Amino acid sequence: QVQLVESGGGLVQAGGSMRLSCAVSGSIFSINAINAMGWYRQAPGKQRELVATITKGGSTDYADSVKGRFTIFRDNAKNTKYLQMNSLKPEDTAVYYCRADTVRRDYWGQGTQVTVSS
């Protein structure tokens, strides 16, 4: 089993920055079974969408809407993954979720609210 806990959400003005964290916990076996991790978001009335992913090997990918503004990175020593968000826009307002993918299943965090005011 893997547990994911997001933090760092809140209210920010348009143009500002915010960093989200996703703390990963569980057995060493479970954590080592994670192939990739990602950040997703869901705005009111919309489907959940992919924001950014990072593989076990460190390869990253981003939604077109956040390229050049968001950066996904990790600190393996802390078992924590981050999403650095710069130049935030009101349309970035959503609940942001952390996800971990293994061969057997995927895991989700509880989500953290990000609100960008205009």
Image: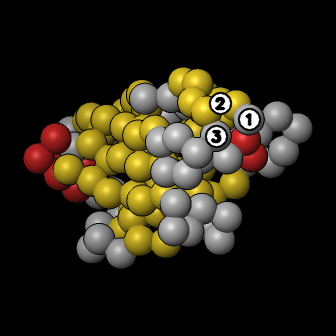
Q: Is residue 106 left or right of residue 23?
A: right
- Mark 2 surroundings within 10 Å by alpha-carbon count, few (fewer than 14), some (14 through 19), many (20 or more): many
Identify the residue shown where x is 32% and y is 57%. Answer: 73
Q: How far apart are marks 1 and 3 (CA)?
A: 5 Å
Q: Earlier in the sequence, mark 2 or mark 3?
A: 3
Q: Mark 2 points at which residue?
A: 115
In the rendered structure, which amino acid carries the disc numbered 3?
Ala
For the residue pair 102 and 51, the one nearer the viewer reads as 51
Q: Distance between the residues labelled 2 and 1?
A: 10 Å
Identify the residue shown where x is 80% and y is 48%. Answer: 47
- Mark 1 surroundings within 10 Å by alpha-carbon count, few (fewer than 14), some (14 through 19), many (20 or more): few
Q: How far apart are marks 2 and 3 (CA)?
A: 9 Å
Q: In this view, does 116 lie to the left or right of 79?
A: right
- Mark 3 surroundings within 10 Å by alpha-carbon count, few (fewer than 14), some (14 through 19), many (20 or more): some
In the rendered structure, which amino acid carries the disc numbered 2?
Thr
In terms of secondary structure, where does tag 1 sit? loop
Residue 14 bears which disc, if any? 3
Residue 78, horizontal then vertical, whole percent: 16, 41
Residue 116, horizontal then vertical, whole percent: 66, 34
Q: Name the residue under label 1.
A: 118
Quarter the N terminus occupies: top left
